[in-house]
Image (spheres, rainbow, N blue to C red):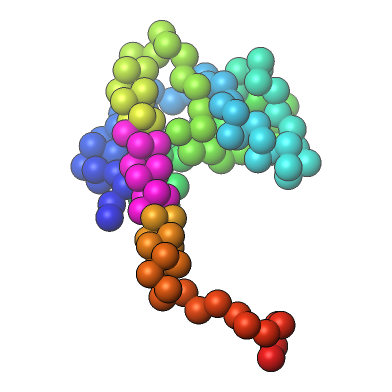
Amino acid sequence: MPIDDYASATQLSNQLEASVPFTVRPGKPLLKVMKEKGTPISAERAYVVEKVMYSGDEGGILCMLQGNATDEEVVGASLTHLIIDPAHPLAAEVKAYQQQRTHQLKLQDERGFAALARQAKAGKLRKRKRGFGQ
């Protein structure tokens, strides 16, 4: 099941790429991931998007971020993990894309979990009667 509508996602990606550079702030999922990686970033700090590309259903629209001109590391993040400036001309389209993609990802996860739960309930998942390797 596709997550994104390819035509609209690539169109939005191209429009965003044409509006580079623009500023964003990291969302909670990005803050958590960067903290776990040992490269914490600030929620209050604005980051400049230097490049935008569409990576398909796997990553959606990706943005390459740099905090300051002196920062050596550029961070790649999914647009769904970023907060775009409400004054940006494409803010409404970005918000709609984020909501649609997040909804589709939740549906996909629920289907996967629901399928496993049905299999377990129907007895199709094999239960181990002995320890590991026996």
**Looking at the image, which is closer to me, 74 or 3?**
3
Q: Quadrant of the N terminus?
A: bottom left
Q: Is residue 72 left or right of residue 56?
A: right
Total marks shown come to 0
Residues in magenta, as a range: 100-111
Q: Is residue 74 above or below residue 82?
A: below
Residue 124 location (% of width, % of height):
41, 75
Whether residue 106 appears in magenta in the rendering, the answer is yes
Q: Which corner quadrant of the image does residue 5 belong to? A: top left
Whether residue 134 appears in magenta in the rendering, the answer is no
Q: Residue at x 66, y 15 (%)?
A: 44
Which residue appears farthest toward the left when viewing the image?
Answer: 7
| Residue 121 shows up from this direction | yes
Q: Which corner quadrant of the image does residue 132 belong to? A: bottom right
Residue 79 location (% of width, % of height):
45, 33
Residue 9 location (% of width, % of height):
29, 39
Magenta highlight: main SS: helix
